[in-house]
Image (tube, helix red, strand yellow):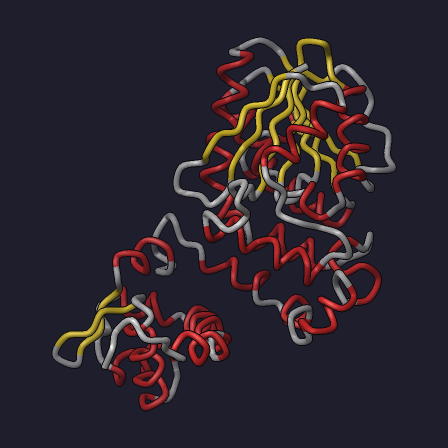
């Protein structure tokens, strides 16, 4: 067989790729990785702990071996290094909770008719998909996606601390969600006052997390739509995290002008986004995030840095630096006037 000849395997595997996410989410929901991490290494032992069928467990475990999330030797299973760190609930870096949002049935529905999405030029979900003002899944996002944001939050807090040190500062956290970004800043900058802005139901999650972190006295909120509510003025730093990709560039520029108006002249903006390279096909996670925006929003996208730089400059930010986030598919843009 000629190894360089066209091979239809990629077509078959791609059309069946939904099975990968289904198997992974099912294993997470069942607690399968945690059971294996506790030393249950046969289908029978895993099934007993997880209250499942041994034959079904064997089939799924073999699938996960092929998918490199489990290892198998002498008919016994162990966790792969990746699964041990991120999928065992006993691990401090456990990420399994993110499946609740990423594989939510409503969000999956956005991808069931991609032909219609392409003909429509955007989501076919009702009321603007994830951009609708009363999209109730943002509470679910806040409750489940925090573990994935640990690395970016650490880098962002470090940037703020390096810029302002121990001086008193006011920080506005747009689309605060779980509140982690502002909380991490407050933990590194003891004199920081954090204002989290998001929809009221979502802010309940952030307020609880701030209180749990012992930062209730440093954390205040503004409830509402970032495009509509009054920010106030006098902020030293504004955090814009996982927000701009939902909207067309002209609307993003509108928001950035509003952000510029609320900042001190010495202020800075830190933006967290999926930012692909200028070729728009690398790196893979950031590049393919554009499809997520196509299917779930009317006009969103994964914008390249030159596009962000253009709208930040137009809004009054003349210094814009792109930074990679270690151990994350996302990037940070640090902007100053």
Q: Quadrant of the N terminus?
A: bottom left
Depth check, front residue: 46 or 318 = 318
> Relative to 34, does residue 173 appear above or below in the rendering?
above
> Relative to 44, does residue 162 appear above or below in the rendering?
above
From the viewer's perspective, tell me whether residue 5 is left or right of residue 306: left
From the viewer's perspective, tell me whether residue 103 is left or right of residue 253: left
From the viewer's perspective, tell me whether residue 36 is left or right of residue 279: left
Q: Position of residue 7 (x, y in %)?
A: 36, 77
What residue is drawn where x is 55% and y is 12%?
A: 164
What residue is drawn where x is 40% and y is 37%?
A: 326
What residue is drawn where x is 54% and y is 56%?
A: 288
Q: Quadrant of the C terminus?
A: top right
Direction left: furthest residue: 74
Q: Position of residue 72 (x, y in %)?
A: 20, 74
What residue is drawn where x is 68% and y is 68%?
A: 110
Depth check, front residue: 282 or 113 = 282
Depth check, front residue: 333 or 107 = 333
Q: Position of residue 35 (x, y in %)?
A: 31, 70
Q: Position of residue 278 (x, y in %)?
A: 54, 40
């Amino acid at each position: 067989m000629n190894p360089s000849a066209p091979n239809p395997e990629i077509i078959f595997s791609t059309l069946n790729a939904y099975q990968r996410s289904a198997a992974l989410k099912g294993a997470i929901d069942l607690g399968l990785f945690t059971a294996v991490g506790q030393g249950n290494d046969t289908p029978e032992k895993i099934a007993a702990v997880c209250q499942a069928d041994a034959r079904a467990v064997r089939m799924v475990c073999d699938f996960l071996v092929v998918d490199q999330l489990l290892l198998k030797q002498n008919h016994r299973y162990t966790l792969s290094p990746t699964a041990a760190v991120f999928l065992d609930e006993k691990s401090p870096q456990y990420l399994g909770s993110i499946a609740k949002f990423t594989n939510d049935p409503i969000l999956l529905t956005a991808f069931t008719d991609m032909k219609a999405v392409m003909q429509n030029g955007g989501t076919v979900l009702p009321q603007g998909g994830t951009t609708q003002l009363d999209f109730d899944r943002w509470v679910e996002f806040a409750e489940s996606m925090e573990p994935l944001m640990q690395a970016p939050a650490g880098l962002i807090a470090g940037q703020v601390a390096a810029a302002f040190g121990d001086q008193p500062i006011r920080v506005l956290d747009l689309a605060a969600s779980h509140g982690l970004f502002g909380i991490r800043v407050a933990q590194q900058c003891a004199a920081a006052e954090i204002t989290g802005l998001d929809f009221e139901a979502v802010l309940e999650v952030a307020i609880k997390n701030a209180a749990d972190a012992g930062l209730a006295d440093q954390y205040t909120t503004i409830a509402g739509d970032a495009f509509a509510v009054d920010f106030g003025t006098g902020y030293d730093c504004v955090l814009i995290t996982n927000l701009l990709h939902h909207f067309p560039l002209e609307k993003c520029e509108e928001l950035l002008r509003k952000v510029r108006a609320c900042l001190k002249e010495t202020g800075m903006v830190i933006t967290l986004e999926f930012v692909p390279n200028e070729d728009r096909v690398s790196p893979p996670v950031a590049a393919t995030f554009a499809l997520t925006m196509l299917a779930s929003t009317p006009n969103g996208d994964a914008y390249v840095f030159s596009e962000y730089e253009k709208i930040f400059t137009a809004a009054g930010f003349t210094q814009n630096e792109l930074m990679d986030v270690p151990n994350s598919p996302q990037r940070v843009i640090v902007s100053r006037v």
